[in-house]
Image (tube, helix red, strand yellow):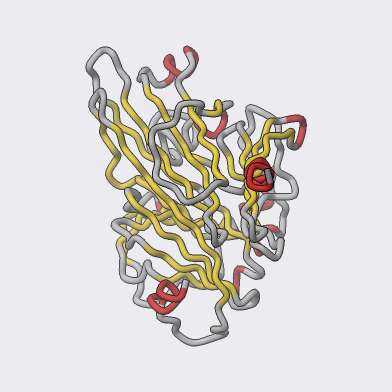
Amino acid sequence: MAASGSERVAVEKCKGINGLDKVVLREPRGSTAEVYLYGAHVTSWTNDHGEELLFVSSKAMFKPPKAIRGGIPVCFPQFGSHGSLEQHGFARNRFWSIDTDPPPFPTNSKSFIDLILKPSEEDMQKWPHSYEFRLRVALGTGGDLMLTSRIRNTNADGKPFSFTFAYHTYFSVSDISEVRVEGLETLDYLDNLQNKERSTEQGDALTFESEVDKIYLGTPTKIAILDHEKKRTFVLRKDGLPDAVVWNPWDKKAKTMADFGDDEYKHMLCVEAAVVGKPITLKPGEEWKGRLELSAVPSSYCSGQLDPQKVLQNS
């Protein structure tokens, strides 16, 4: 009986803010995650000390059809303004269902939920394609957070479709001016602040002193975010997601956003595993899979160059 009791606690369906349905995942050592069915939106990820690792704005509106500001919005079938649809597509503004018949999936975790989105008639008018979008959110035994998306073309008319995609992850950081990102050095990027102009990044780790909105192309499978003040390093591992978006609105833009506090830019950084530079095209029956794994590891590095490989090997 004890085992079934712990399994029952591992996945709990309940009501969240404004009565919206959510699922709470719990891992035996104490880490947790929360997922709203609205947007299949991860709004919380805590470690075994109860520290929140994701940023959600204090002004976030949990009121459909507005997207939730923070956590991990899912951008599909369009990232940003890269197409004719609304900003970041519509998946983050839809009510998803719990997938009662998910595909076979190797997992060690008991703390996971499978969600599914299919197009409504209204969606078909905006984007005339039939698809099944399956998302699994899982907590690993060490508290890692794993998101796996499977998108299948179910068009009956034989037509392919193309899409761009991102896990728009908002990380919680102590002070943006004390943060550095490693793994994107010397890469080409598109600068959204310069009309998507293509440039090449310098050889140093990224640091932040003004607004940034860049799409890095052909990025490595691992990226590290070092938070010196918290002595914590986030490690992103990704598969099927060649690009990485880095975004912080800074002070002027923050003041223009109704659902974002004027000073909250100091305590967040978006590093987003994405497919933007070269859209994915699926023929009917074909499936795309994009996987993101997030871990938070202690780091005692306060200054100087950190070899991300050491962090990645130790985590």
Tell me where residue 23 sits by quadrant: top right
Closest to the observer, 211 or 149? 149
Which of the 4 image quarters holds residue 21? top right
Q: Quadrant of residue 282?
A: top left
Number of callouts:
0
Q: Residue 127 in the image: x percent, y percent?
A: 40, 21
Q: Can you give x and y, in whole percent of width and height, for residue 120 in the image?
A: 49, 16
Q: In x, y percent, where is residue 71?
A: 60, 48
Which residue: 41% across, 59% down? 237
Q: Is the residue 114 above or below the residue 50 in the image?
A: above
Residue at figure coordinates x 58%, y 73% from the top left: 232
Report the side of 73 relative to 9 (left or right): left
Observer-nearest of 134 and 159? 134
Quadrant occupied by the N terminus: top right
Does residue 62 appear left or right of residue 199 in this picture? right
Q: Vertical placement of 10 versus 54: above or below? A: above
Q: Is residue 307 left or right of residue 57?
A: left
